[in-house]
Structures are given as structure tokens and as C-alpha cells.
Image: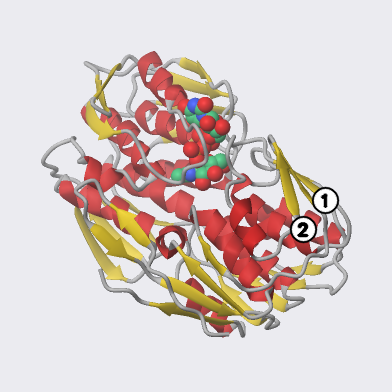
Amino acid sequence: MKVVYLPSIIYFRGGRVRAMDYIVINGQKTLKGKVNISGAKNAAVAILPAALASDGVCVIDNLPQIEDVLGMIAAMRSMGVKCEFRDNHTLIVDAREINGQVLDERLTKKMRASYYFMGALLGRYKHAEVPLPGGCDLGLRPIDYHLKGFAALGATCIQEHGVVKLSAEKLTGANIYLDCPSVGATINIMMAAVFADGVTLIENAAKEPHVVDAASFLNKIGAKINGAGTSAIRITGVPSLRGGEYTVLPDPIEAGTYMIAAAITNGDVVVENIIPKHMDSVTAKLKEMGCTITEGGDWIHVCGNNHLRSCDIKTAFYPGFPTDLQPQMATLLCRAQGTSTITENVFEQRFRYIQEIKRLGAQIKVDGRMAVTKGACVFTGAEVTALDLRAGAALVIAGLCAKGETVIGGVSHLDRGYENFEEKFRSLGADIKRIKRDE
Ligand code: UD1
């Protein structure tokens, strides 16, 4: 089949138009081999601003080379923070002298994690001006818990022209209850509370591995945080943070994406450099579907099955099934025998990708927060667009098992969160390539 690649076009405010890269996949290749998992995006983008709050030099290792990380570094450099790569994955951050606590919208609008500059700058400098965050469009993504937390610590929060302006004479420890265990609010409040006088208790805190990783990094450089990984985090304020070295944890979402890709191609893949415990919810569901899974100290071996069984998934906060793997898992469930249900409990609009996987042949219906698959669909290649990061991963997974050629636009979303994904998939035997488009 000869595919004519239509230009994928983005309209910028100034009217500038840019054509973007495409991914082309020739599907139905069985994935086999080993894949090394990179550092976790969501931990890295929290640890970088935390390093900005340090009075010393921080060395951060196992940083993934992805657009969100590079975007955070660009934002830090714009404030005068010295950031130098020692090698591709190790960054030296020197924030001893910075030239302001004001961030430009052009540097923050693509990334959700830019909100972490609020907690880091407010904590260390008692002042921050940070535009409202960008990131994937998954419906309303308010930051009211973050702001309520900062206010409880004694900060004044004003929102003007899309910018959050935070200031305080001093911060004082407080008891803060989160209405739901928001990852972003937990880490952001924790970063500000590190510098508050006295003790802060965050109740109903998020327990995700990257919350623990951010707390471990902060403790390594002098913070006093107890209880990260439980629903009650206790922070005793300190006057300043020193420098230190830290290695970012492996990415559970990247690992889960490769596990699901192995399952959908009836593959035989060892996912390496991971913490298998972080994958429990995914492992359980893949086993329920009929995959054979074995695990060791830092790896999981996934063998697919030609007759995958249906199952139901419900996204939840950690240790529940992660919403960031919901699109990939739903794609796999489309291939299983029988009906499966997918309930999205974290984000109100995380089914927008379904219109695109339907173009590849998925038989799936959405009703509110639930999607229902009819099962055993045969994906066939088509031209589709990644509407957000994990939606893009779902399309790659569908393309890997589709008959013929799948052409995926909107690749910049994938580049935000997956390091070298074409090379990694190619090394497993996938026929996948990127077609570069000049700006
Ligand atoms: C983070 C992750 C994202 C993941 C999500 C859930 C980062 C950079 N992003 O996003 O990849 O999908 O956790 O695991 O780590 N909420 C409010 N008010 C708030 C904050 C959150 O109502 O102030 C709601 C949200 O709308 C959502 C839920 O709480 O329904 C969870 O959001 P949260 O955990 O904060 O997600 P993010 O930090 O946006």
C-alpha cells in the first residue's frame, strides 16, 4: 500500500505553521529480546526543580533524554541555573546563584510538571511567578490543592493573566488534607514545606513511586521527610538544602508500555532495569489475560499468548492500575477474546484516543467514564494522530500488531515522555521508523 503522508500541522498563536515528524510502523512483527528502561519521567521532572531549591551542587543521574526533561532544564536555565550534562543521562545542577523567580509561559506551557517550580521557588525564595501548567489535555486539571496547600503554609497566592504569583514573609508548618491523593499537589506542597518553620503533615498524600523518589532526593540533600509512600507525609522544616548525588528511579510507565507491547505481539520480551514491585498491577492484569510472566530482582519477562482473555480494569491511585497505562491496556484488551471494561477514575477525559484507535479497527464504545471492548478485533494500518503522550503510546502498540502500515502523527507527544522509543522497539524486532519533517 502506498501511503501519501499528509502534513500534520500545528498553528501557533503568532500564526506560525510547523510540519511534524511521523512514525511509520509495518505491523505484525513479534517482539523478542531485551529492553532497558530509562529513568522515570515523572520523577525526573520533580527532582529537577527540587535541585533548584538546593544551596549546593546536585548531580542527577539516570535522567531520561525526553522533551519534558529538556523543557524543565530550559526553564531552569532561563532563571540562571547552571545545568551541564556530564553525559547523556547525568546532569550537574548548580542553582547557587539565580537571577529571578519568574518563568516565561513559552517555557512552561507544554509541561504539566512546570507547576513544581511553584513549590521549589516559594520554599527557597518565598516568591514565585509561574504560568499555569500545560501538558496532556485530559479534561480539567485544576491545581487548587497545590494552591490551598501553599496558602496553608502562609503564602499569598494571586492568579493574574494566567500566571500564579506566590509570596510569603515566611512559611509555617501546617496540617494539610488533600481531597484526593494528587501526585502533583503532594510533591509541590512537600517541596515548599521543606523550608517551612516547624512540622507539616500532608494527609491523604499520593503514594506513587515518584513521590517517594522526590522525597528520597530531598532527604539526600538535607530535607527531613518521613512517610513518603504512605498516605501521611511528615515534613520537618530545614533552613536550607545542600548538594548531593542522586539516581532517578526507572520509569514504571515506560516499563508497562513495553510489557503491553510484548503481550499484543505475542512476543517474548525481558524488560530490564526496573523495580518489579512497581509493576504489580500491570503484571496481575497481564497474567489474568493469559500472559506468562516471570520476574527477578530488576527485570520482568513477558511472554504473550495468541488467545488473550478479556478482563476488566479500573484506574486508581498507586498501587492501583495507573491511568497513564490505561490507553495502552485498553488497546491490548481490544485484541482479547470477549468483552472487557475499562473504568477511568482519575481523569475525566482520558478516552479521546479511542476515536483514533477505532480508525485502526478497534471495537470499543465509551459511556462516560467507562469503555467497553467487543474483543478480538483485527487492527489494520491507517493514518492516525497521537492526541497526547499515552494516547501516542497506545497507537504505537496498536500499530505493532496491525496488518499493513500505520502512520502516526503528533509524534512530539511521544517525544515528551519516551526516550529513543523507535530504537528500542526496533531492537526488539519491530519495523518502525521516523520520517523527519523540517520546521
Ligand atoms: C500526575 C502525573 C501524570 C499522571 C497523574 C495521575 C506528573 C508530572 N504527572 O499528574 O502523568 O497521569 O499524576 O497519576 O507527575 N486534582 C484536582 N486538584 C488539584 C490536583 C489534582 O482536582 O489541585 C485532580 C485532578 O483533576 C485529577 C486527580 O486529582 O482528577 C489526580 O491528579 P494528579 O495526581 O494531581 O495528577 P497530575 O499531577 O496532574
Q: Which of the image's four quarters has the C terminus?
A: bottom left
Q: In the image shown, does 362 or 97 lie closer to the viewer?
A: 362
In the figure, is residue 161 to the left or right of 340?
left
**First-in-chain label (2 vs 1):** 2
Element on which disc 1 rests:
strand
Disc 2 marks a residue whose amino acid type is: Leu
The disc at residue 340 is: 1
- Residue at 10% across / 41% down in the picture? 99
| Residue 112 in the image, given as x and y percentages of width and height | 40, 42
Give the residue number, with chain letter if any, for mark 2. 333
| Residue 404 in the image, given as x and y percentages of width and height | 64, 81
Q: Rounded to the nearest whole Å, what is the CA distance between mark 2 and mark 1?
A: 7 Å
- Residue at 26% across / 50% down in the picture? 12
Mark 1 is surrounded, within 10 Å at the Cα level, by few (under 14), some (14 to 19) or many (20 or more) other residues, namely: many
Q: Is residue 248 above or below residue 157?
A: below
Q: Is residue 20 above or below residue 116?
A: below
Q: Is residue 306 above or below residue 207?
A: below
Disc 1 marks a residue whose amino acid type is: Ser
- Residue at 42% across / 41% down in the picture? 219
Circles 2 and 1: CB distance less than 8 Å? Answer: yes
| Residue 162 in the image, given as x and y percentages of width and height | 27, 29
In the figure, is residue 112 to the left or right of 337?
left
**In the image, the residue with mark 2 has its CB under 8 Å from the nearest atom of ligand 1:** no
In the figure, is residue 297 to the left or right of 237?
right
Q: In the image shown, does 416 or 193 lie closer to the viewer?
A: 416
- Residue at 47% across / 36% down in the picture? 184
Q: Is residue 410 above or below residue 160?
A: below
